[in-house]
Structures are given as structure tokens and as C-alpha cells.
Amino acid sequence: MSGEERLIYLPLGGAGEVGMNAYVYGWGKPGKERLILVDLGVTFPDMDTTPGIDLIFPDMSWLIERADQLEAIFITHGHEDHIGALGHFWNELRAPVFCRRFTGHLASRKMEERGADPAQITVVDSYPDTVEVGPFSVSFLPVSHSIPESSGLVIGTPAGRVVHTGDFKLDGAPVVGEPFDAALWHDIAGDGVRALVCDSTNVHVESPGRSEATLGPNIRDLVANSSGMMVATTFASNVARVKTLAEAGRDAGRSVCLMGRAMLRMVQAAVETGVLTDFPPVISHEEAEDVPRDNLMLIVTGSQGERRAATAQLSRGKYLGLELKEGDTFLFSSKTIPGNERSVLRIVNAFSEKGVNVVDDSSNLYHVSGHANRPDLEALHQLMKPQMVIPMHGEHRMLRRHAEAAEANGYASAVAVNGTMLDLTGDVPSVAGHVETGRVYLDGTQKIGALDGVVRGRIRMALNGHVMLNVILDEDDEPLGEPWAEIMGLAETGRSRSPLVDLIEAETAQFLARADDKVLVDDDKLDSGLRRAVRQVAVEEIGKKPEVTVVISRLG
Amino acid sequence: MSGEERLIYLPLGGAGEVGMNAYVYGWGKPGKERLILVDLGVTFPDMDTTPGIDLIFPDMSWLIERADQLEAIFITHGHEDHIGALGHFWNELRAPVFCRRFTGHLASRKMEERGADPAQITVVDSYPDTVEVGPFSVSFLPVSHSIPESSGLVIGTPAGRVVHTGDFKLDGAPVVGEPFDAALWHDIAGDGVRALVCDSTNVHVESPGRSEATLGPNIRDLVANSSGMMVATTFASNVARVKTLAEAGRDAGRSVCLMGRAMLRMVQAAVETGVLTDFPPVISHEEAEDVPRDNLMLIVTGSQGERRAATAQLSRGKYLGLELKEGDTFLFSSKTIPGNERSVLRIVNAFSEKGVNVVDDSSNLYHVSGHANRPDLEALHQLMKPQMVIPMHGEHRMLRRHAEAAEANGYASAVAVNGTMLDLTGDVPSVAGHVETGRVYLDGTQKIGALDGVVRGRIRMALNGHVMLNVILDEDDEPLGEPWAEIMGLAETGRSRSPLVDLIEAETAQFLARADDKVLVDDDKLDSGLRRAVRQVAVEEIGKKPEVTVVISRLG
């Protein structure tokens, strides 16, 4: 195949993980392909592996080096893991951005926030409208998911049609936006689909997915039968859910108040872009203060236990003049994303202490997923009958399970994780190469490499504490006074009950007194000797091996 | 009631959380009660809230101050959250320890490890054997749980009988150890039970619990139908499960090899104490290397994703000469404890990359909980018909739900979290006072208070990075040379692309040059000025506000 024009697929993020989606397609001779990028998302840091980091991006170096080959960027929908990095990389990629209206509204903000020009975003209508970019013709195919105007992409290429699902579920009644239109998808498959590149995140769920519309009656019953203040949280971008919650409040004779910036912003975006037309009237939080508790319903941010969001604030006490009390009800109309369990449980227990009745989704009555389960994925395979199924977006175990399911039904498939370039031109997908990928961290205002050692230093200080030792040497390389130690993140006293810093200073002073000239003139030898002395004291006194920073000042 | 003798209950740990159980009972005049302690456990740290900490203990200060009132310590079973702190506090409490044989085996080790005398432990037989200590007569009542010889305690007091369940489930066929004996429990209730102090951890599970014995056929089928190497993990202390797994291996014609120190130690303890009599023969890991994969079954530690345990090691590559390959099967015969999801998923995905088939408990076929669910709890209430039900061991939401269930069935109840002293002498439990409680951390070899600021310092360094700045002033309080900066956990360059340390040194040098004598002679003013200058540079350059340690050395 070398030298021949080919169709390639290259995930730079999202394949081998849930989050930070970024998929490249290319057509052309090897190395000369014209490229498009589908989605440019983020993933979120955690204290275990990325303390202090603000956001995590896919490493886009490969594409940035080939920015002149990049024809366009397509965004399937407005979730952070598909759109969040757009503004952070646009100035390095500089290609036109295409998306639908609601996504465009959010994308413009992402661009503005990072000093990129929102005029680079072109809002397009859904299929059959088509964008022609280089060798590709791309249409947005409406699909149901947990945010308005989610889309699959129909990508026409010289090697045939690729359908990239984006995140999706098969929902005939999604409350807001277009239902999944099986006939339309089937029509598109009519001329043959070379590759179905397909969401994998829910492949381990063996039951068929449930419609967003199934929740309405359950939520309505719960709200109608609750006394006191009613509060519900969900993902702000799940506008359909917010609407269902608001309608339940209205139907129960409650005034509805939206709280949390993301919640207000998302509903506003949905109204402004016309995807949300008949949302119940809402009141401000100032007005809410004057409404009797039995007649009030709050819909708030923070379903994942985020410390600064409305849910966490309400669990701690008064928030914007409102406070929960015994007998009130708090509904988590959401699932807890793995890793957030402790934060969410902390809030549930805080509410429990207040006597608030917490309703979570353990009953399966108040939340449905936005992703296709294994039977739904297989149904889509059957509907589209592609030449090959390429599992996309998911941890390795999900991609693998998805490929197994596809192969069991007779489709060619391949597990391609971030950095694996597939050639989709033949009868079966083949590996065309491997590209160096990874993660880039946003730390404050700076992008730093995941392997730069910055985070490693933080984790080591967090685990081991930090000793700083200062030594001053005079013009003759003789110690001037005693060493000076400071500690952070370490017990002040240990086994001997003397201050740890005193013991460190005494031990390092002794080391200096014993050190011969060859050591005293050599910063490296001094540093390693002093470091060893500090560690030895710390191990004896408190049983820890701290990080040590030695500063040697020479007055020479 | 003041002045009258009374029966008190005081949780110092375990009530308002899952973990670090420690419950005090007392009889006597207020302040003069004779006391017993039930359980003395630990809880485990996490990176979010307790980085670098080794173990978390309940704050036992209240009891240590009253050690002369303490008659005895009773340990219900050998799980770390009931026994793990025994050795760490015994020298401060110095009371005789009573437990059953298997627990005693583990308890002796806990004592030895911390330099306490294991001879202080008295092994006692189960009910009707009774220990008389002060005003209390205490018997160990066998109960089913997920570790051998778990026991409830029947505590005779001058105010009547208290039954303290310990952790338990109602299992008529626990595979190892005594089945739950409803008739015996009912007999004990015959003379009336003043208070049932009762495990709450599974109260949110609405279905009745399942027996350990139900797993045997499922596990046997899975092992028999797997080809390649079979590996299973579970909690090492769940000796019944380890036996079920080993028997499934043997029945499938596989040689069984136990891996991981805890696994070997627990099985050995169970054999030595006679609770485990017919365990299948096992081979060493050296022998396992020579066994064909299809004929080998490993039972290993690390079900929670612990980095150094056998499971994690196997997921990374070769461990003790053995390595998993495509087509092998790995069974998690365990649930993932909240907070460990990410670690476990990391391992599952690593196995997926190797082509290993991972079987987890999503099917409910390969794991059962060791705790009583809500219907089981209610069944025990009905069996014992106590005067009052005191929910014990669980997060606040669990204690509250348990109390609600008890009250709905007509029992007096109360939610008492750590530090809440209940008077159980009357018809209903009443709050007799509040005691200061909290957590104590084991950090290296030292116990430190949770509020000492040590952990706070670590978290701040992890989130913000650390800048160390050294300034030397001469005899005339004039700066000697330029300030010297070091950084840890921070990007080396930022917006201007110059080294951050250079910019910090330049800015702080300017500050010193501008500083007047009043500042230069005043360490506090210098410190705060320099700190501000460092932060300002860091915010401008990298958008972070680091922790700053300023060291001022005066040659005067």
C-alpha cells in the first residue's frame, strides 16, 4: 500500500480512556495526507496522579507539526471532553472549525476565553447539508445523547463513507432535540459504509439503553410527593434533564430556581440557539428567598461533588441566601463518575446530618445514561452494516469488548488506542504506524508535559514532606555559622521530642565540621552529604524520608 | 439521672464513617464509670485528604485520660478496621485484651509489631463462656461475616443485657466457621435485651443478603470453563472465599498457588488456629513456574488495586516468575471499595492490553458482601426484640437510615456519631454528653493530630508547588549578594520563556534594593515582602500562587 493514496484514522485522545477525545482522519499518499480533526476535548485531573493541574489535554504535537495538512476541525457536541481544548490549541492548529448551532455557541466561548477568534467557527445545518474540505465531504447527522444537538459525522472520502458516531445513544424520545432517526441512518448506510467509528463507553452494560423520556413520570412523582424544599442536581449540559426537572417542579406547584453558573449558562445557550423553546418560568435566587419551602424547587450544579459548586455549598450551609433543613429533599439525577465517589458521599452525609432526604440513582428511576449499551451498539452495527467497526472513545477494556462484539457479528474490527494509526483503505483495518502521543497539562496558565517532572515533584512533596537546608560558606570555603533548616509537611517533633529542625541543624553542622576541604569546595559532594544527613535524622526521628532541597551560598 | 449509676455508650470511631471502629461502654456514676472498649481499628488514608499518611486512628485521648477506669478491651474480629490500632494504643491504655482464637493470632502480631506484650491477650471460647470485668460480664457470640470467628458480644450490665453485633451477616452456610445460629441468638434475647448495638454498613441494600455458599458453583463453573492460567483475587482475610477459590481450582485439575504475603499469612493463621481444616494442597510460586498454564490457578492479593500487591504486579508484567498472557482469565472475587475505582480500573485495562479476560463482580455471581442488608437487619431486630436499637458502624446516612428502619418497626433508636455519649439506662436512649473526638494520623513512626497542619502543608505543596528563597544580610543588615531561589513542583519557564527562578531572583533583588532600613532589620516585614514578590512573579509568569518559604540569614 506504500506510496498509494490511503484513508487513515489516528486517535490522539479518547481511545484507551474516557475523556479528551481527538481523532484524526486523513486521505492521501503516506505522509502527505490531507487531514481533518474530529473533536478536541479535555480530561479532568485528580489528586492521585495530577495534583494542582487545571486541565489535561491530548498531546497534539503530531498534528501541530502537520498543521499545514489540516483542512478543518469538526466538533460533534459540546461536552468538555469533546470541545474543552479547542481554544487552547486553535492558535497552533489554525484550521476552520465546523459544528452545529448549540455547539457553536459553546465553542465560541472556548475560543474567546483563550484569545482565539470565534469567527473561525462556522455553524452548519445538519445532514444533508455538507461541508467540503479537501478530499472530504462532511455532514452532521443528528443523534441522541445527553447534550443538545449531538451529532455523528458522515465523512465522504475517496475510499468510501466513514460514519463517526460521536457519543450517542439510541433514543426515540430524548425530550430535547431530535430523536434517533433509524430510517435516516439506514438511508445513509444505503450506499455502503466503509467504517463505522463508534462510541464504546457503555459497551459493558448488557441491557438495552433507556430513553430520557422514561424519567419524566418518576421525577414528577417524586417531586409531587415531597414536602419541604426540593433540590435536584444533574449535569448542567443535560438540558433535557434540566427541563424534565423544571417541569416536574412547575407541575407540583413549585417555583423553579436555577443555581450555579454552568446551569444558568447552559439553559441560556439552549434558549438562545433555539433548541429549548418551552422551558418553565424561573425565578432568581433573590426571589426564591421569599418563596415558602413547599413551593420551591432548586435545580443546581455540582452532581459530582465539586467543592465550589452549588450542591457542595448547600451541603455546608447557606448558599445565596438559601439553606436546606430537616425534611427537605435532595435528588441526584445523575450518576457518580468513577473517582468522584468520596466527594459525593461526603455531601450525602452532610445532608444526612441536616436531616435532608437524599435520593440517589440506586433505584435507576431518576437517571439514564447518554451512551449506547452493548445491545444498542450491536443494533447500530446491524443498521449500518459497515465494512468494519472501529471502536472509539473508551478505556482499553471497552474498545476490546466492543471489537469482540463486532467481530462476533461478522464485522472486521481493530482495537486502536491513542497513537495507533489505522489504514482503513483495505478490506480490514491494518496498522499503518504508531505516533508518539500522551498528555499535556494545563497548570495555571502554562502547558506542561506530563513527563516534565513538575507533577512528580508535587506528589513527592505530598507523600514525603519537604526539608529545606541552607548552608553558607565564607571566602575560605569554611562554614559560616550553622546550617539553617526549614520544614513543610513534616511533624515538628519525633522520637526524641526535640524539634526536628534543631536535630537536622545539629547533624548537618556536625557533617560540615567533619567534612574535609575536598568536600567543602565541591557543591555536589556537599549537597549529597548534607542530603543524606538530613534524611538520616528524619528517618530516625519520624520514620520518613523527606524531599530535601539544599542551598549552598558561597560568599567567595 | 445525674448522680445515679448509668449505662453509657460512646463511639470514638466507626460511627459516622466506615472504618476505625472503637466503642466504649461504661457503668457507674457519671464520670466514675467503669469502662470497656470494643474494637480498636484503623482506617486508610487517601491522596485527596491524607497524602503520605500511613494509617488513620480514632483519637483515643478521652479514653487514655481515663485508662484507670478501663477494665478490658474486646476485639470482635480480625479486620484492620477493628483490630489495626490495637498495638498502636495498647501501651497508653494498658488493659487486658480478650478475643477468640483466630482474632487472637492476628492481635498478637499487632501487639508485637508495636512493642506491646502479646501476653496481654487472653483467648476465650465463645458463648456461654463469659469474661467478668468490673460490672460487666461479656461473652463472644459467633456470627457470620467475611473473616473467621467473627463475633457479636453479649454484654451483661447492671442495667440489663446489651448485644453488640460487631460486623455481621445472617449466613446459614458461611463455608468456614459457624453458621449464623438464629436459635442461639433468640435464646440470648430471651431474658430481654436492653440495647441492640448494630452494624449499619449495608443498610442501603434493600434485598436480603446472600450466603457465601452460593458462590461455590458459580466459581467452580468459571474456573472449569476457563483455559490458560486462572488467577483470582479476593480479600486475604476472607478465608472462606480463598477456600472456595482453591477448591474450584483443585476440582478443575489445577495446582493452586497462593501469592502475596497477606494471603499466605491469613491461610496459615486459619490453619494454625484450627478454623481451616481441609484446604486443598498448594504449591509454591517456584513450583508454579513449571506447571502448564491450563493446570495452574493463582489466588492473589490486591483486589483493591494496591500498587505493590500481587494483582498490580501481575498487571504490570512478570511477578515471582509468573506472567499473564492472552487468553488467561483474571477473576475479581471482590467488590471495589469506594475510592479505589481508579486503581482497580487501571489494572483491568492493563490486563485488557495483555489480552487477559477479566471477570469482575458486575454479574453478582462471584462475590457476596459480609454485611447484613436492610431486610437482614430488620430480621435481627425482630429476633432480638430489644428495648432500643443503636445503629453502629457506618456513615451518617447509614446510621440515620438504620435508625429510621428501627423506629418504623417500633424500636427506640438514636443516631449517635463519634463523640456522642448515649445514656442507655432509660426507656429510650438519651444524649448524655459530647466528647471531643477526631482522627490521629500515623505518619512514618509518629502519631500526629489531624489538625497539626502537617497534612495541610503537604496538600498545599501538591496543589501549588513550592518556592524556596534565601536571602543573606550582612552585619549592617545590607543584602549580601542576590537572593537565591529554588523551585519544586513548578514549571521551569512561563510566559516570558526566561527561567522562573531567574525572574524570582531578579524581582526579589529589586525588592531588597528598594527596601528601607526599617524593612531590612525586620524579619517579618522582609519575609512578607519577599513572599509577595515571589508570588507576583509566579502569577504573572505561570498563573500559579506557590507556597513560599523564605529563609533570611543574618551574618550579624
Image (spheres, coloured by chain):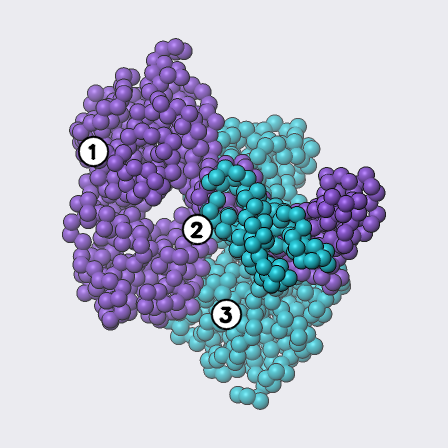
Chain colours: A purple, B cyan
Which mark is first along the chain, 1 or 2? 1
Give the residue at mark 1. A124
Element at label 1: loop
The quadrant in which residue B522 appears is: bottom right
**Which three-letter amino acid code belongs to the residue tagged 3?**
Val
The quadrant in which residue A499 appears is: bottom right
Q: Is residue B286 left or right of residue A477?
A: left
The structure residue drawn at horizontal position 68% and vertical position 47%, both measured from the top left corner, is: A551
Element at label 3: loop
Indicate the position of residue B265 as horizontal and vertical percent values.
67, 48
> Which of B546/B88 is in front?
B546
The structure residue drawn at horizontal position 53% and vertical position 41%, both measured from the top left corner, is: B491
User: Are circles 3 and 1 on residues that touch, CB within 8 Å?
Assistant: no
Vertical relation: B95 (above or below) B294: below
Q: Is residue A199 left or right of residue B541?
A: left
Q: CA distance from mark 2 to mark 3?
A: 24 Å
| Crowdedness near tag 2: few (<14), some (14–19) or many (≥20) residues, C-alpha within 10 Å | some
Give the residue at mark 3. B417
Q: Chain of mark 3?
A: B
Give the residue at mark 2. A340
Q: Which label sits on residue A519?
A: none
The structure residue drawn at horizontal position 39% and vertical position 59%, both measured from the top left corner, is: A312
**Which three-letter amino acid code belongs to the residue tagged 2?**
Asn
Indicate the position of residue A102 as horizontal and vertical percent values.
23, 42
Question: Is residue A328 visible from the viewing direction of this image?
Answer: no
**Which three-letter amino acid code belongs to the residue tagged 1?**
Val
Element at label 2: loop
The answer to whether dots 2 and 3 both sit on one chain is no
| Crowdedness near tag 3: few (<14), some (14–19) or many (≥20) residues, C-alpha within 10 Å | many
Q: Looking at the image, which residue sits at the far left?
A: A278
Question: Is residue A444 visible from the viewing direction of this image?
Answer: yes
